[in-house]
Image (cartoon, rainbow, N blue to C red):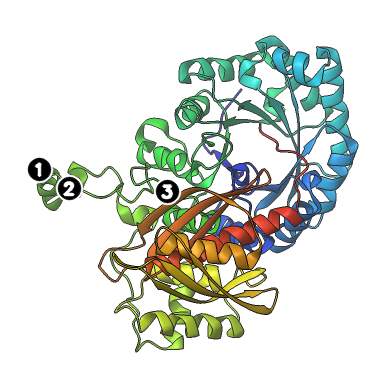
Amino acid sequence: MKMNDHVLIFDTTLRDGEQSPGASMNTAEKLRIATQLEKLGVNILEAGFPAASDGDLEAVSRIAGKLGKTEVAALARTSKNDIDRAWEAIRHAVKPRIHTFIATSDIHLEYKLKMSRDEVVKAAVDAVKYARTLTDNVEFSAEDGSRSDRDFLCTVFEAVIAAGATTVNLPDTVGYALPQEFSDLVSYVNTHTPNIDKAVLSVHCHNDLGLATANTLSAITAGARQAEVTINGIGERAGNTSLEEVVMSLVTRNNSLGLSTSIQTEYIHPTSRLVSMITGIMVQPNKAVVGANAFAHEAGIHQDGVLKNPMTYEIMKPETIGLSTNRLVLGKHSGRHALRSRLKTMGYDLSAEEINLVFTRFKELADKKKHVVDEDLEVIVTEGILRTADIFKLEYLHVTAGTTVLPMASVKLDVNGRPMQGAGYGNGPIDAAFNAIGKLTGTASELLRFSVSALTGGTDAQGEVTVRLRENGLLALGRGADPDIITASAKAYVNGLNRLEYLKTHPVKESIVL
């Protein structure tokens, strides 16, 4: 078959990415990420799995109604109920896509599905045919495709394409494949599926062996023309293929690969930062493309080379992914117009009421530190605009600690609109604050992880704290930022408790991994 040179980018940050432990997002947060992903230029956005919960259906529906040009996909198992729920959620989208799937590997057939190969083919065909009565944009995925019998995989793909599937997806569900092996499989499917030219061949790789990007690129060079990815590579277990790694590989090595995407690369870093802030999942410093150290040079010989010619040690320009050295620096004398202008540049199109709220918090922060930078503004918007429906809000915190006193924290919270005050003791000021907050909220969560980092350089930088909490089998990440690290810790803990409360009221029926 004749290949075109354009690769479609299918982003599943809001579906597969949200399955990262504790990464659940509320509807407002999902809408913000969806808007940014459309600005980034993704072709297809998988907004969720509507059959999982009423909350997921609502979020997918809101996203479908908001986006103006990006295809919106909803995941569904091969059941009429799942497909109906998916269609209910996306039917108002400009370009709706139903994405249905069933496992095709023998191990899944025997132990999970307890179905024969013929039964799997029938279920897949019936699902695609039914989905086609609702939309002509149907994708079919063969779960655990990389461990499936090659000929059976081709049989399934041929059958679903004949039934009307316009995209067929080959997932490396458990991250087991090796690059050459996966490339060979894609080539085999292209060669042995008679009607493959009537559909787009897609790949969806997981990173269990750290090979997700390599496998995806190998598949693309072998003829796949849709890559299923997530921002920052977040997702179940070790995560998914990273959007930024695949896209920048295609951009940087275009002379060798000759392939293009529709991604506006200057929005890669802002999008990465937004997803990190909303999910509370920090990007490791040495992460390719978007890590804090990706464009940092400490070795003297590297610094000397970069000063003489950046291309000696930088294969990408920082500006290409949206890391600009020329920033409008805001301070306490900056006005609303400058703030609104900067926020619009960052992708935040806020109402007058929201600008007023952000401006008030901006002035409060500007009184504490000399310059307010983009990362600070993101914190203000994320915490002030996207989380207005939180059950618990931190109103006041006072701590005493030292070498000769028992650490104690006094806390005032707003709990469902009702002010509550209390105090607690601990091994240190943060432990004392957590104990006080725990008593006031009546929660019994277990702290699994606590990490601290600085948002920017300088001694007046805001500290960013991330916590992971567990309660009754539920996991949630919490995040907080403040120039005072103890206050940032308290904010992170309260944010985590709010996320736990959200999970309690928005139960997910089943976790789905392709």
Question: What residue did someone put label 1 on?
Answer: 301
Q: Which quarter of the rendering shows the C terminus?
A: top right
Residue pictured at 46% horizontal, 87% vertical: 336
Give neighbour class at mark 3: few <14, some 14-19, many 20+ (Cα, 10 Å): some
Residue 298: assigned label: 2
Q: State whether residue 376 is above or below residue 211.
A: below
| CA separation in Å, label 1 and label 3 | 27 Å
Question: What residue did someone put label 3 on?
Answer: 283
Residue 513 in the figure: left or right of residue 116: left
Q: Position of residue 48 (x, y in %)?
A: 70, 47
Question: SS class of the residue under badge 2?
Answer: loop
Q: Which quarter of the rendering shows the N terminus?
A: top right
Quarter of the image holding residue 19? top right
What's the amino acid at mark 1? Ile
What's the amino acid at mark 2? Glu
Nearer to us: label 1 or label 3: 3
- Residue 94 visible in image: no
